[in-house]
Image (spheres, rainbow, N blue to C red):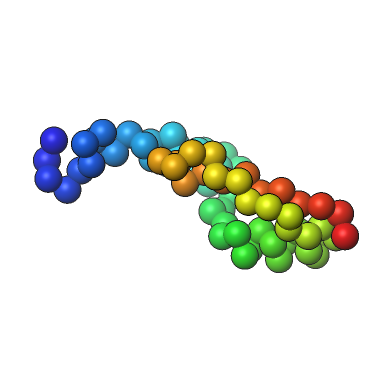
Amino acid sequence: MPKPLPANGGRAVEFEAGLDMHMMNLLNGAERTSEQFRQIAEKAGWKPKQVYRTNELSSLKILEFVKM
């Protein structure tokens, strides 16, 4: 592997990058921070409860909200 690439060749983020591209191109979506999700949810009457990491190699997270 060339020096700047991790040992797995960058495969750990390939799935997330593909999801980002689908979301942006097909749904006119945008990547959001946890704070942006919190603001959107609070406007809709929800409050954040917990953030779950899917695994240590992934940037995907599950955000749990509860009704206010």
Q: What percent of the width, then of the height, locates residue 37?
A: 66, 58
Q: Is residue 52 above or below residue 9?
A: below
Q: Is residue 63 above or below residue 1?
A: below
In front of the other: 35 or 51: 51
Q: What percent of the width, then of the height, locates residue 48?
A: 73, 58
Q: Is residue 25 visible to the viewer in this orientation of the structure?
A: no
Q: Is residue 2 visible to the viewer in this orientation of the structure?
A: yes
Compared across the picture, whether 4 is left or right of 42 comes to left
Q: Is residue 28 above or below residue 41?
A: above
Residue at 13%, 35% (x, y): give it: 1
Q: How many marks?
A: 0
The image quadrant that residue 17 belongs to is top left
Q: Residue furthest left?
A: 2
Residue at 71%, 48% (x, y): give it: 64
Compared across the picture, whether 67 is left or right of 35 comes to right
Give the quarter of the figure containing the C terminus. bottom right
Residue at 56%, 53% (x, y): give it: 30
The image quadrant that residue 62 belongs to is top right
Residue at 86%, 54% (x, y): give it: 67
Q: What percent of the width, then of the height, locates residue 10?
A: 29, 39
Compared across the picture, whether 51 is left or right of 41 comes to left
